[in-house]
Image (spheres, rainbow, N blue to C red):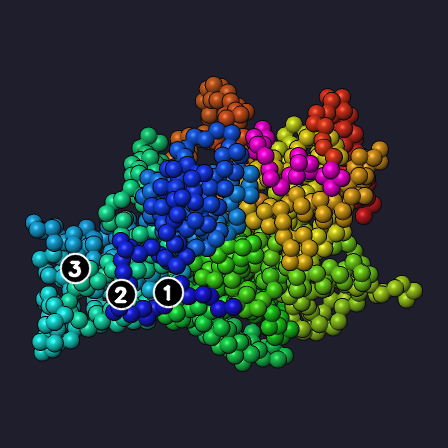
Amino acid sequence: MPPKKRNSGTTQSKGLKPSAENASPDKKESPELSVKKHRDKDADFVTLCKSLQVSDLVCDRAWALWKTVQESMDEITDSQKRLWGACLFVTVTDMDVTCFTLTQVLKAVSLNVKQFMALVRKLDVNLDTISTKVNSALTRLEKKYDVTLALYQRFEKTCKKIFALVSDGKERETVRSCWTMFLLAKGRVLQMEDDLVISFQLLLCTLELFIKRCPPDLLQPLYKSAISKVQSPPTRTSRRNQSKAKSRPPEPEMDVQLLETLCKENECNAEEVKNVYQTSFSAFLESLDLSRSPDFPQVNDLDQQYEEHYLKSRDIDGRLFFNGDETVLVPKVEISQVERTPKKNLPDDDAVLIPPQTPIRAAMTSIQQLRGDLISTGDQPSTNLDTYFKNCTVDPTQDVLKRLETLEQTFSQRFGQAVGPRCVLLGKQRFALGVRLYYKVMEAMLKSEEKRLSVQNFSKLLNDSTFHTSLLACALEVVMAAYGESSFKTGGYNHGGGGGDPAETDVCFPWILDVFNLAAFDFYKVIESFIKADPTLSKDIIKHLETCENLIMERIAWRTGSPLFELLKQEHEGGAAEQVETPANFSQPLQHNHTAADLYLSPIRPGHRVLPPESPATGSAQASSQGPTQPANQAPRHPKSNSLSLFYKKLYRLAYTRLKILCSYLLSSHPELEPIIWTLFQHTLQHEYELMRDRHLDQLMMSAMYAICKVKSVDLRFKTIVTAYKTMPNTNQETFKHVLITDGHYDSIIVFYNQVFMQKLKTNILQYASPRPPTLSPIPQIPRSPYKFPNSPLRVPGSNNVYISPLKNTRMSPGIMTPRSRMLVSIGESFGLSSRFQKINQMVNSSDRSFKRTLDLGSAPKPLKRLRFDVDGQDEADGSKSDGDSTLIQKLAEMSSTRSRMQEQKMKEDAEAKKE
């Protein structure tokens, strides 16, 4: 479904609506409040409702919510009025009515944006007060606020370099008008107003307009000289007298020299800004009848039109940034408090202040790096790549070009629908960068395959449409990540699915998969090879792709219709030669020789069948390899899928990593339970994989933890698990609030456990309470990220906080290499007194380590007072309650039994390994 347009780019400047003084955002939905109907409520609450012009229904529901919150909170530390404001915001958002704007409620309760956001989230005491719809709205507002704040801070800094101070303060009026016009342009041009890069480019376009129309005495020398000489000095002309000024030569639509100066001063790509000007900003000026007028826009007109936009959007009045209003500005922090980093190559005692990396500077740097890496790459296949194409049995060149032409149209149109109707050309520019990266990485992959296989005919791979589409999608994801348009602020929940604002103006991953109609399981196959093929990718981009891979494994690949289920069905029902992933392999390092070529042409497993006379990667007889023949009397066995095997290896390691974190939060006093929980978790993923359909990996993890704690008589409530889960990285409340129960029906995690998980696995779960519980699954070896960052320090095996790094410059002294807060031991050199070794021992053994998370891992989080999806205090399908404590003897016996079984199993595995 195409995105819903928040605002058209062609809004008329004439026929303006009344301003906010005499009009609520929508009077029809907010009839006047009847005070008589609300005598049962606090008079001050009713007064607040009346000031915000809410309806009787909103007043009733907000009061009911307040009473619920009041009962749930152990102690109310905030003022009642502020909490009432938060309840009203939650209510109107859930009801989707237009009563007041965010700024209006901030003013009413005297809070700034960040304080109010924190207060609203604080209402979620029982984890069911804030719906996913409200949470989505909060996330969108917070992101838009962060972007607008970053833009205003850069605007303020830039204006000081542009405008000269004059005695009558006329420059301040000019700057105010410039900021208001930018806000209006951003609102008219962009549906996705949190797009930092395009917003900043629009800001530069607005500054260009005001600079060239500004009297010379208001400009600093740099910008006075930057204006093209062909321009006539601007004069203020009223609209009535515009017809008399026709003899004056028309003003150029865009002053290229001035715009290039602005871009250079702000480290922004000039060609991109010119395109934004021509495609979007010019159309905006036309809508204001300003494109050829030499006059300044009328301040009152701009204010009135922006007011109209602000009331429709129902969020933050951006003009307040210019006024320094307390509702939008954050307290200023001294630069030394923001970031004080000892600079390398200087003596230890000379700590140099480094300015903090601003969002805009980070975005511009990311784009510059991407463009710089692609300077030598063309828009067409290189000579080497063309040779690879020509060496194929079937030349893929024409198919490649036709595919790119089709996908360019699809991508640019969908980009325009999401970002803004006049941003189609910007989508084509993003696509062009993606094509360059696509060709660059493809050539590097083929060179690597040629070296690995000693062949040059890659016909089978290069004629695989899914491979090409996946590779291009990955390249485009890198481009959009570099531009800051794809991020994970919502934890990967970007397409609704739990109520709330459907992400119709969101190009975050997995948006690209939807655009290309590409299966997540197919996309995952290219990620690792893509990263290895392009060593110029920044650490942030690598982390972004790694997060994409994790999202695929934990949720997206398990959607109905995914090819993953068909592969699993073949493995389990079709007589596959092996299990999805042999448990004995868990403890082996995650090392494999599979490239993207292997994975896209999978299933292939040499040794289980006679391979065809073609290499899986090349389709050439020169690279064929033979496996042992199938015995005549043995039933035919299907080949094992390389892509499925590698997927499950990574899945298990991701699953265990997340489980280990949650166990460290909750079960530090019960270390014997972790391997048991893992065994149930792993069994579920391997044998009951249908439980993952349209669900999340963490839902099974929390259910497995709860189940084992119940059968082992360890008192751990689901509300405690969920509270701890919220503190884990990369989590989203939708994971535990919105779980699939049956087709189309969703409910909380506890309902899923009772009605689905427990019913499916009850027999298996109860075995863990028997004298002969199931054999423990081996613990996966958790490696560092497979995507190694250059010059990253490596942890010394067997240590917790001892790392080594390669020596970059042999002439550097140890004191210069390391920050003052750490110590360096140079093996083979004199180290000095024994007291220094004692200091190292104290540092290593200290429990107060700097890398500890904010949450104390040694203690469980404080349980919530009440979790409303626990019915009558009962957590189980059978309605029983836990008895709480277990005796010390029982704990010791369990620990001894578990460790004994682990040791026995380890001995068996070692014996089997020796036999092999």
Q: Earlier in the sequence, mark 1 or mark 3?
A: 1
Q: Position of residue 333 (x, y in %)?
A: 31, 37
Camera-side residue: 171 or 458?
171
Q: From the image, tell me which residue sits under label 1.
A: 7
Furthest-front residue in this view = 36
Q: Is residue 285 left or right of residue 507?
A: left
57 w.r.t. 235: above or below? above
Mark nearer the viewer, 2 or 3: 2
Q: From the image, tell me which residue sits under label 3.
A: 223
Mark nearer the viewer, 1 or 2: 2
252 w.r.t. 165: above or below? below
Q: Position of residue 639 (x, y in %)?
A: 77, 63
Q: Which residue range is magenta in the image?
A: 858-879
What label does residue 16 carry, if any? Answer: 2
| Residue 511 visible here | yes
Q: Residue at x 20, y 60 (%)?
A: 300
Residue type, mark 2 in image: Leu
Camera-side residue: 662 or 327?
327
Q: Position of residue 570 (x, y in %)?
A: 76, 62
